Image: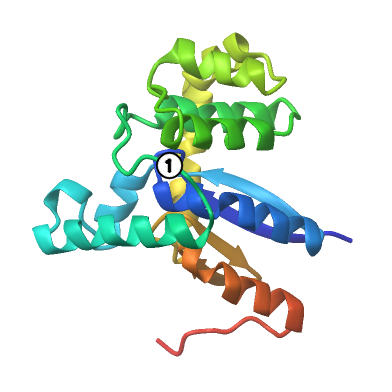
Amino acid sequence: MARPIDYYFSLQSPWAYIGHGLFQDLASTYNLKVNYKPVLLVELFSETGGLPLVKRHPARQRYRMLELQRWRDKRGLKFHLQPEHWPFNGRLADGVIIAALEAGQNPEPFIRRAFAGVWEEQINLGDPAVIAKVADDSGLSGAKLVEHSASNEISAAYEQNRQDAIAAGVFGSPAWVLDGEVFWGQDRIELLADALKSGRKAYTSPV
């Protein structure tokens, strides 16, 4: 029986992109049932005490650029540190993932193409036509999913993911919740792998 894991992320997030492939390999190795939960980052940050990138101290912004380069090398990736069309409003693209799930379709091919599109190919994932093409190229019905993504129904599901994230103790992207234990950041994937390999019980916080 597949073991469930909640996966909180946004297509806006470079860290989710960096860790996505490795996580999917882990999910395959350990037969995980991945519950994809795209989440609106800006409001999640503010509610949990974080700051948007543009409001962070310059020292923190400079350090972020160093970390992106380090992890780009570490993960063997090739991507632009400052893509032409980033940041973008991720609501519609993230919503396509939810719409695909509601239609009983696997969103994984779309997620992989979308991440690579933003960070490697510098496409504009804030453009509905571009999103539809990425979905089409992934074997999905792009125009139909983009249309549904804009609906109030998907907006409500997106908001529910945010509420679920807060309730679970998630405050950034990417984050995985395994048996109630939160693993935040692509640099925690190895720790997630250790937990899966050992079969240990979930750690809890005393506070």
Occupied quadrant, residue 92: top left
Tally the marks.
1
Res. 157 in view? yes
Seen from the viewer's position, the closer of residues 110 and 181 is 110
x and y percent of residue 192 in the render? 61, 72
Residue type, mark 1 in image? Phe
> What percent of the width, then of the height, locates residue 52?
22, 50
Q: Quadrant of the image for the N terminus?
A: bottom right
Between 16 and 6, which is closer to the camera in this rendering?
16
Q: Is residue 180 visible?
A: no
Q: Residue 79, percent across and down?
A: 43, 42
Furthest residue in direction left, as rendered: 58
The residue under the point 47% across, 10% down is 129
The residue at 73%/33% (across/down) is 106
Circle 1 packing at 10 Å, graded few (<14), some (14-19), many (20+), is some
> Which image quadrant for residue 87?
top left
The single residue placed furthest to the right in the displayed view is: 1
Q: Residue at x 57, y 20 (%)?
A: 134
Residue under label 1, please give it. Answer: 79
User: Regarding mark 1 in the picture, which secondary structure is present there?
Assistant: loop
Q: In which quarter of the image is the C terminus?
A: bottom left
* Residue pictured at 33% horizontal, 34% vertical: 83
For residue 65, side relative to residue 118 (left or right): left
Q: Which quadrant of the view contains residue 40?
A: top left
Which scheme is used to colour this image of the protein?
rainbow
Query: From the viewer's perspective, is residue 62 above or below residue 152?
Result: below
The percent coordinates of residue 105 (x first, y second) are 74, 29
In this view, the residue in front, 46 or 156, is 46
